[in-house]
Amino acid sequence: MILRIDRLQTEMPPPSDPDPVGAAAVQELLGGKYGEMSTFMNYTYQSFNFRNRQGARPFYDLIASIAAEEFGHIELVSTAINTMLTGATEGKPGELGDLTGVKATRNTQHFINGGAGTLVQDSNAKPWSGDYVSASGDLVEDLTHNFFLETGARNGKLKVYEMVEHPAARALTGYLLVRGGVHQVAYARALENLTGVDLMKLFPSPRIPTDKIPECQPHIKRGEHLKLYRFSHDDFNEIKAVFNGPHPETGEDLFVAEEPHPEGAPAYDLPSQPAVFAPGPDPEFLAEVSAKLRKAAGLPSKPTGVVATDGDSGVAKKTKKAVK
């Protein structure tokens, strides 16, 4: 069972200049072979299929907790893509020019099938596949697979970071490079505790200088490169039995956070995109219906959810106009 919280795991910037071409590249971090769909589904199915949980409880707790965090990473990648697509299709449905400006983008499916939103596919619009999932049932095999999956994932994140300048893409990859590094260390420590092999000699792998990447710095200063979260208030406490010892690159102590999940940050309420009927061709009508339903249910007149405002983020910047 997963408890969902209406916050992002980290702060993301508001929409600035749209970049649909860059958004197509970021799709690799969602639906690519080493994307967040793959890490999430690998660890999730390994946790579902885990046998003798009590006999090997610390390892089950580790895989299950990281799987829960990966769900939030999918949300973050989708948020970045949706932010980058916001504003690419201005105007009202049926008016000339509303969608002509995006007909030459790398992934027109974002607008034809996705409502200017993320899709379950890679940077070439190839759908994500269950063939990317390995849940063999053998703990050593699965942990080894997971370590190298995280290695490939961090490699891809760095390349997208260098490829895409949009602030949403940079904020996304800066955070995921740090957290993916934690997962990589976690699986290496689990293998060491299980087999006695010294995997710390493999680090850094790949050789990514997160200490020199500006978007990584706030997370490193908060110690996000050292800790794992349980994503549960009461369960998965045995992670600390395998996630411990010194960080292989900094020598700092690894630890399990006392808080169950990151503090996180509210997401921006991305504006309607009527040209692609998202969430419909008439946003005002939807707002009126919602207000009536809210009143009939005895709810407050204003929506009760929390969203970010323009003053919440200091990372939004104007970037180059996308090449259409």
Image (spheres, helix red, strand yellow):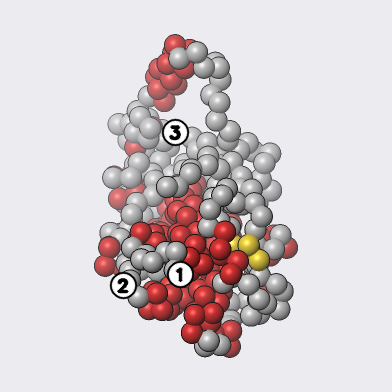
First in residue order: circle 1 vs circle 2: 1
Nearest the eye: 21 or 151: 151
Instruction: State whether residue 19 appears in this view.
Output: no
* Rendered location of residue 133, percent (x, y): 32, 67
Residue name at image x 49 percent, y 80 percent? 194
Circle 1/circle 2 CB separation < 8 Å? no
**Looking at numbered disc 1 in the image, what kind of residue is underneath it?**
Ala
**Looking at numbered disc 2 in the image, what kind of residue is underneath it?**
Ser
Instruction: State whether residue 200 appears in this view.
Output: yes
Instruction: Report how far apart the C-alphas of labels 2 and 3 lie in the structure.
Output: 43 Å
**Looking at numbered disc 3 in the image, what kind of residue is underneath it?**
Ser
Q: In the shown orientation, is residue 13 left or right of residue 156?
A: right
Q: Which residue is mark 3?
A: 272
Nearest the eye: 239 or 148: 239
| Mark 2 secondary-structure assignment | loop
Q: In the shown orientation, is residue 162 left or right of residue 296?
A: right
Residue name at image x 48 percent, y 43 percent? 4
Nearest the eye: 288 or 48: 48
| Mark 3 secondary-structure assignment | loop
Rate crowding at label 1 as few (under 14), some (14 to 19) or many (20 or more) other CA atoms within 10 Å. Answer: few
Nearest the eye: 9 or 19: 9
Q: In the shown orientation, is residue 82 left or right of residue 181?
A: left
Which mark's residue is nearer the viewer, 3 or 1?
A: 1
In which image quadrant can residue 247 be found?
Answer: bottom right
* Rendered location of residue 2, percent (x, y): 45, 47
* Rendered location of residue 258, percent (x, y): 66, 55
Q: Which residue is mark 1?
A: 56
Instruction: Report how far apart the C-alphas of labels 3 and 1 lie in the structure.
Output: 48 Å
First in residue order: circle 2 vs circle 3: 2
* Rendered location of residue 74, percent (x, y): 44, 54
Q: Which residue is mark 2?
A: 136
